[in-house]
Image (cartoon, rainbow, N blue to C red):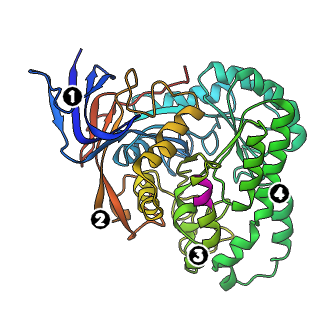
Amino acid sequence: MDRRIVRSTRVLAQDGLRAAAVHITGETIVRIDSYESIEQGVPLDDFGSLVVMPGLVDSHVHINDPGRAEWEGFASATRAAAAGGVTTLVDMPLNSLPPTTTVSGIERKREAAEKNVWVDVAFSGGLLPSNGHELVPLRAHGAVAFKCFLAESGVDEFPHVLEDDLRRALPLLAETGAPLLVHAEVSGPIDEALKAQHNLSPAELRKYIYYLESRPKAAENQAVDMVIRLVREFGVRAHIVHLSSADALLNIRDAREAGVTISAETCPHYLTFVAEEIPDGATEFKCAPPIRERENRERLWRGLKDEIVTQVVTDHSPATPALKCCDSGDFSKAWGGIASLQLGLIAIWSQAQQRGATLGDVAKWMCETPAKLVGLWGKKGAIATGFDADLTVFDPDAIQTIAGSKLEHRHKLTPYDERSVTGRVCATYLRGRRIFDGTLSPSSTGRVISAP
């Protein structure tokens, strides 16, 4: 088997940041030893004082392939992941045609991805009102989690579920042992808010404040409360995706302290941007739930510090410029989703260091906890003996300005364009092989994986 040593004066292993040499045999880390522990004849990659940290695990990515690959396909998405230090991602079940809600759907996903991915890829299955019988077979065919919406998803082929639907499905979900990933917004408060906006002018529809008001915090808060109640009743695992409303934090904390198996994630855009600064017509900022006010952002950061929110993932959800209504700037009609897969690490580090967080904190939020959520811990998410040799070489002190036109995403539209950030991904290793060092490996090396 091929052997290699990767070393630095700053290796972020499980016992902290220290000088070390990571010894790799084949695809696996076989030991983490002293910085001086090099061996004659074994190739050495010495990164000086750059940080060697675990490859990121992004458990919330929308790739849309097959069927809507013009939004984002496996090749472009996984190239962007590699350039951003992400070595494992979990693809969401909607937006592709067919969606990943049947065994045939997940097999179509697998066919589209195989031999076309630069990083390792796993799949979530979808939970619909009528497909509870598909959950156990989907799990057997590799689904690491299941995703549902409590309000309209934006695509007709992925209808949302109601409480009665969940009551029928949760006993079946329990058989799989997989977590339920919940888009936690309910329709009632959204419908009421939209009724109040029925006479908005074209100029008003370009203003972000009206879109923000159309997705009130109450929609998230009520959804989170319902999920907590059902999880307590049925004893399943649930995970709130892309938490935006900081008002829900205390109820999540109280539920967890009472033994309810619920967790939550948030995203770089909720921790970076604020509603007060979004320009008129800037539909690249539109997502659901929405980016909220500055005070809400700071409360989310406190939720991370207090370990109420346990992970940060991108919810990368790109679309074509036409779907984003770039010409009209109409927030009411634009697709809701932010392109950020390549940018998650540098976006979070830029904000985290300003609030006293460490790279160890970032690795916990963006590597360890996502891997544990979807059952990949033991292979992914840490620099540790027996784990895959997935590594990100990171310069935490570099200053750069993001150039959207140079991103690997299929479409370059992103709210991070021209934003100054701190940090740069210098190299990425997937299972011991360097797949990015400023340029991408010319051939794909990723695999479709399942939870053990």
Q: Is residue 312 above or below residue 287?
A: above
- The 10 Å Cα crowd at callout 4, few under 14, some 14 to 19, many 20 or more, is some
Lower sequence index among marks 4 and 2? 4
- The 10 Å Cα crowd at callout 2, few under 14, some 14 to 19, many 20 or more, is some
Looking at the figure, which quarter contains the N terminus? top left
Mark 4: secondary structure:
helix
Q: Which residue is mark 1?
A: 5
> Could you tell me how far apart the alpha carbons at marks 2 and 1 are, in whole angstroms?
28 Å
Amino acid tagged 1 = Ile
Residues at discs 4 and 2 in contact (Cβ within 8 Å): no
| Nearer to us in this view, 434 or 345 | 345
Q: Which residue is mark 4?
A: 187
Residues at discs 4 and 3 in contact (Cβ within 8 Å): no
Amino acid tagged 4 = Ser
Q: Which residue is mark 3?
A: 329
| Nearer to us in this view, 310 or 115 | 310
Compared across the picture, whether 306 is left or right of 437 comes to right
Let me know if residue 172 appears in the view.
yes
Looking at the figure, which quarter contains the C terminus? top right
> Could you tell me how far apart the alpha carbons at marks 3 and 2 are, in whole angstroms?
31 Å
Image spot of residue 38 (x, y percent): 15, 26
Q: Which marked residue is nearer to the observer: mark 4 or mark 2?
A: 2
Residues at discs 2 and 1 in contact (Cβ within 8 Å): no
Image spot of residue 337 (x, y percent): 58, 58
Q: Give me the residue at 84% from left, 31% from top.
A: 234
Amino acid tagged 2 = Ile
Mark 1: secondary structure:
strand
Lower sequence index among marks 4 and 3? 4
> Could you tell me how far apart the alpha carbons at marks 4 and 3 are, in whole angstroms?
24 Å
Mark 2: secondary structure:
strand
Q: Give me the residue at 53% from left, 48% from top.
A: 313
